[in-house]
Amino acid sequence: MAAETFGENTIVIDLGLDRGEPETYARPTRRTVAPWFAPVLIALLVLVVAGGSAAPPAPALSPLLTLRVGPADTYALTDNNELLAQTQGTLAAYDLATGTERWQIASDRPTYRLRAANGLVLMRPWTSYGPGRPNTTALSLATGLTRWRHDGTVMNLTGSDALLGVFAVRSGGTNRRVQGPVQSLQPVDGTVLWEVQVPGTAVLLGVPGPGDAGPRMMLVHDNRTAAVHDLATGQKLASAELPAANYGPENPAVSGGVVLLRHLGRYGVMISAYDPVTLQRLWQRSADTAYEVRDCGPVACLNSPDGVRGIDPATGAERWYRAGWRGVEQRGAMTLAYGTANGGADPVGIVDPSTGNVLSDLHGWRIVGGTDGDRLLVTRDVAAGARTMVAVAEPGLPGPRPLADLPPGTGDCQAAPGRLVCRSASGELVVWAYTLKE
């Protein structure tokens, strides 16, 4: 419809539909919006509403338990996923899964070492306050009640439930140098089951028995006589005279089911292998420059100033050599290699002991004590020491996977499955729960 005005008269012209505008503009017969538009709009609205109401993701590292501790207070983690902690005159056990306190008792003396074995907590004080005072107190791991006391040090051998009471000469490492009586103790009440006298001093270590017979006790006396004893009865089963050697904490060593001794030979330093059942020599080879023999699972590792060699314990044949390594360590089922002889300060990585290949590079990181199954926790300082990063390392990963930052002043850490226990500079012992982000 159009209108024109000429003077005072108005003329109306009806254009109809011939101007080209279809009737469907006023009455559409099909959708004017794409069919996918409504479902997409609804899905977006659902995402917006759900995202707005969902809780933020949990932090990778969160405090589960915090305790006030003194500088001399010690703590330990058990195989039953428990924390034993001495805190300002008390000793308590906590469930690491929940942080719940299981029991608490008064502790009259600062403890040098806490250890759990055979359902017991074995406590050694910093001082014994003279002869005749108990040097080890055994508590029930379930209740904290005192079971018995022993004048010496209580130890056990790998793979055995037997508790041995010894009077140790100060030494470190896997083996112990002992003197006087070696006593087998009943775990329930500390009763002496049998006793073997050591006239002078001797190095004590555990050696494998035949087949599935379980481990046995081996004493290498200071007159170079080695004796193997049954752990159930104390009976002497075999004895032999060994070569002159520097017997100590890591010599002899047990690897691959044989006893390996580093000793002086006619043409230099040698390494000899002995059958742990009969004490008969199996083979002998040059030690080269090796100063230490270590168990590396399927091989024995010879640590030397110029590198580490992996040898077959059954034959002494060399399997591999790594010039950049200086030491190795077994941590659970994992083998760690280090670039320094004392270990810990310069880790090379998690390695395959059968081949010497590096499975996960750990250069620049520090190893945290303990394990989480087939994983390790590692730390390193970042931002010029202003903070400490904690990461997870495991075989198959090229390097550690960053987890979170620890508060400044955190140290003396131990790892357990899903947990990290650390001291703080403010005098606290903190149990952190951690989750791995996939």
Image: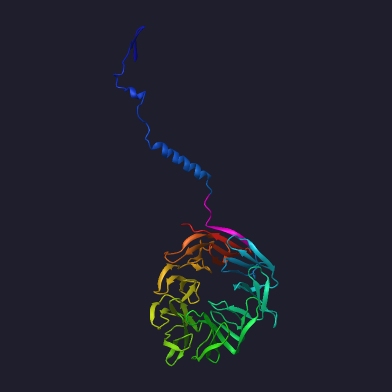
Nearest to the observer: residue 406 or residue 136: 136
46 is within the stretch colored magenta:
no
Q: Position of residue 413 (x, y in %)?
A: 56, 66
Q: Position of residue 398 (x, y in %)?
A: 41, 64
Instruction: Report if residue 249 is visible in the image.
Output: no
Q: Position of residue 36 (x, y in %)?
A: 38, 38
Where does the magenta region start and end? 56-66
User: Does residue 411 lie above or below 211 as drawn?
Assistant: above
Outermost residue to the top: 8
Q: Quadrant of residue 24?
A: top left
Nearest to the observer: residue 269 or residue 28: 28
Please identify the quadrant where the N terminus is shown.
Answer: top left
Give the colour scheme of this rendering: rainbow
Please indicate whether residue 430 sits to the left or right of residue 365 in the image: right
Please indicate whether residue 39 sits to the left or right of residue 94 in the image: left
Nearest to the observer: residue 434 or residue 276: 276
Nearest to the observer: residue 157 or residue 248: 157
What number of labels is visible? Answer: 0
Q: Quadrant of residue 326?
A: bottom left
The residue drawn where x is 69% and y is 68% is 105
User: Does residue 1 lie above or below 170 as drawn?
Assistant: above
The residue drawn where x is 43% and y is 76% is 298
Instruction: Report if residue 396 is visible in the image.
Output: yes
Q: Position of residue 206 (x, y in %)?
A: 53, 81
Please indicate whether residue 315 sits to the left or right of residue 213 in the image: left
